[in-house]
Amino acid sequence: MRHLVCHCVLALGLSLLLLSAAAAQAPARATEKPEQIFARAVQLHQAGDLEGALREYQAFLALRPERVDARSNLGVVYARLGRFADAIEQYQRALSLDGGNQGIRFNLAVAFYKIARFVSAAKELTIVVAEQPDNKNARYLLSDCYLRTGEYTKVIESLAPFEAANPNDRALAYMLGLAYLNEKQMEKGQRLLDRILRDGDSAEAHLMIGTTHLLIGENEQARKEFQRATELNPQLPTVFSFLGQTLVRLGNTDDAQIAFRRELANNPNDFISCLQMGILLKQEQKLDEARDFFQRALTVRPNEPNARFYLASVDVGLGKIAQALPVLEALIKDAPDFVEAHVMLATVYYRLKRKADGDREQAIVNQLNAERQAKQPGAKP
């Protein structure tokens, strides 16, 4: 019993010593004014002591949570530390206090961009560009978001009005030229490709040349150009996606999957790579994995008809008929001429013993097919 008491006394004494030491080391926050804490946070921030600045900004915001500049600065610190989710939270809280601050909104967009949330980044950048039409950085980043999500018409709408005033801007020429080529505006795309080629051999030039070959069906030439582009710059956005699409056309689906996965390693939200991976895995009857890729594709383009159709088709294959039904019903409402969707919906109705609904969809399929045949060359009037 005596030993136990001694141990308790010793432990208590040690605890008191530790508490005293901690109190001696801790900043005297109780006696400091909030502005002193903020000033120290800024000083540490400017000196590059990000962890120290982080602690001080947090301490200041615990006292002054409404201070927009401190919250924005904290977001910058988180971003520089690579903690982009935390940075996004702080920027959003700052914008809730000052919604018109386009500098904070731009930083929020950049944080979204850094974690490949290009749709979210584009949403914020659209607001910035609307308020600041001459903000070149915001416009170019917005155009790059559109390029990465395959929204080529939006790239053209964003950049075409500025082409004449920026004849030597390589970034503009590349993004706009690639968009023109993918929209089959070949003459405009070729003009910008020529501008890129004047600067010599580059990954961007090979990507644009490969796109031209791909669009006119010269698949082997396209493959060579895309392959060269990957050698020059394996981080170039969409380059592995285009290579994968070409390999699919050439029947090399194994290497196509490797290319699509390389693209997704660089850009987890590349729509084409997600969609194509889903299609290839569906063909291999790897339905659960295919479904994940179709879901990822829909996070990038929520209303894209093909992704919605393939997601429903996988659910049908997995026996999740009730899950596929609302997807297909919404799809034919938005895309009434989508024959394959009507065919699958008819199949779903029949499996659910809804014969009248299935017969109605089958009649629509017959009508749409007849209209297609009537438009074929040589069809009788």
Image (spheres, rainbow, N blue to C red):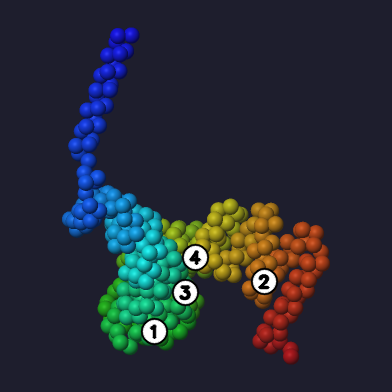
Q: Which residue is mark 4?
A: 300
Q: Which residue is mark 3?
A: 151
Asked whether residue 16 is in view, the answer is yes
Whole-Å distance between the Cαs marked 1 and 4?
A: 24 Å
Whole-Å distance between the Cαs marked 4 and 3?
A: 11 Å
Q: Amino acid at mark 2?
A: Ile
Q: Amino acid at mark 3?
A: Glu
Q: Which residue is mark 1?
A: 160
Instruction: Describe the element under mark 1 as helix, strand or loop.
Output: helix
Mark earlier in primary sequence (4, 3)? 3
Q: Amino acid at mark 1?
A: Ala
Could you tell me which residue is drawn at 67 percent across and 75 percent down? 336
Mark earlier in primary sequence (2, 4)? 4
Structural crowding at the residue carrying mark 4, measured as other residues with C-alpha within 10 Å and reported as few (<14), some (14–19) or many (≥20): many
Quadrant, the N terminus:
top left
Could you tell me which residue is drawn at 68 percent across and 67 percent down? 329
Structural crowding at the residue carrying mark 3, measured as other residues with C-alpha within 10 Å and reported as few (<14), some (14–19) or many (≥20): some
Q: Which residue is mark 2?
A: 332
Structural crowding at the residue carrying mark 1, measured as other residues with C-alpha within 10 Å and reported as few (<14), some (14–19) or many (≥20): some
